[in-house]
Amino acid sequence: MDISKFNLATGFFASHQKYPQNTALFYNRQVYTYQFLLERVLVIYDFLCQQNIQAPFIGIHSKDKAETVAAILAISAYGAAYVPLNPQSPTQRNQFIVKDCGLKIILTDAVLSNDLDTLDGKVLHLPSQKVYTKAIEYPPRKIEQDIAYVLYTSGSTGKPKGVPVSFENIQPLFQYFDEQFDFNEKDRFLQVFEWTFDISVFALLTPLYKGASCYLLPETGIKFLNILQQLKEQQITVVCLVPSLLSLTQKYFKELSLPKMRHCLFAGEALPHTTLEEWAKVIPNSQIYNFYGPTEAAVFCTSYLWEKATSAQESIHDIVPIGKLLPNLEYQVVDKNNEKVPQGQIGELCITGKQVVRQYLHNIHPEKFFKINTQHFYRTGDLVQVNQYNNLIYIGRNDEQVQIQGHRVELKEIEYHLKKILACNVAVVVQKSKLGENILVAFVEGKEVNEVKLKKNLQQILNVYMIPRHIMAIKKMPLNVNDKIDRKALEKIQP
């Protein structure tokens, strides 16, 4: 594929040419064929042309998932990068993203227009026109720039980090799936992720590039139960899930049978082997993969095909290996001095290759990127070791960044805001719930707290998944031999 002509809508246009009447999207019981979706994309594209928009980044703030898909494709076809703003995120967080990105244009639906009154930038309602009256043509780029999308990850300074992913970064990922997987136009994918979560890029665009159907999760109801219901009712054949879903739904496994599932992918968190063995009985005809990858490496950068017998031997502390790197990537496992560690020893995983971004927006945190000779590496912050089969084994984090519900969260960001509110010593740790999921627990030293009021304050600043499940007052923080807060000791204190 000629990267100079590639945008995120390119594969969708090719699928429309082959399968115009196939179902592209299914959302809220409504079918959107490739023809219908293309016409909606062209309406939004023409709208952008009429506005003569020259901004390289365009925000999207919409509750309608089908409209969001059309807007993503239209923005990319236009040549701009899309920047998703989560309607469920606090206004303060969205405001930061708008300012940090310098967003001049934000596309929204009429339902959410009042929510954007406090945001900078020009707010434009998505056009209501449903029928495209012009001749159907695949539109050319109007803006020539390299960024496909910008997503924000949690930041240790209390401010999210913008990750600008280029067309060149993301294109090899789609090429990998095109060459290595047998996805086809008859497949049914389920997209369960927020648009601000990078796995949504895979879950949405992969089916649209194959002429397959993408089923979008309904907004109402309990999310994890919705996922199980959609997997069964819609006879989903391909899905990517976060491992915590297994812990939340394990009690339903015996009641569930999904023989139509062909490929089940996991990503976003450490994957427990024992629970996966039980899930494998639910999807007897499916291949199961464990994928790993930070947002900075365009969604996925390693892959591991799970098999019951061999994976049991390779799993350490019941955690399934993350496998080997995708073809266009290389890695080094290094110590604190960036020196390569011997095979089998634990070190930080650093990756390089076409999928890896060059820097964060505004080049903040340059220490996360470094060079070995002429190769440009990204420090993942993940501790790994390489086993005898040359598979990467995930050990844990070398900092306070953790996975909560599949989202990467910097504990320091939460601590920053708690300290700002309370003006005292605060520590946030991760504990396991009775269901085996990661939960956040905050400890406040020497100060009584109103937990309900404090959580309400945090809701104005942080995403829901970043708010500690419990906030506890303790007389004094436990310290280790280095006079640092002993987080291991805190993890043992039960709420």
Image: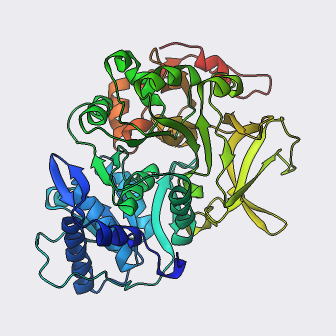
Q: In this picture, is 397 found above or below 148?
A: above
Q: Is residue 303 left or right of residue 8?
A: right
Q: Position of residue 22 (x, y in %)?
A: 24, 59
User: Image quadrant of residue 368?
Assistant: bottom right
Report the front residue among 155 and 168.
168
**Observer able to see residue 78:** yes
Q: Position of residue 80 (x, y in %)?
A: 40, 76
Residue displayed at 56% across by 25% down: 272
Q: Is residue 113 left or right of residue 141?
A: left
Q: Is residue 309 left or right of residue 35?
A: right
Report the front residue among 281 and 347.
281
User: Image quadrant of residue 70?
Assistant: bottom left
Q: Identify the colour scheme used.
A: rainbow
Q: Position of residue 194 (x, y in %)?
A: 36, 48
Residue displayed at 34% across by 24% down: 257
Q: Position of residue 491 (x, y in %)?
A: 59, 19
**Total residue callouts:** 0
Q: In this picture, is 243 found above or below 92?
A: above
Report the front residue among 262 and 357.
262
**Observer able to see residue 445:** no
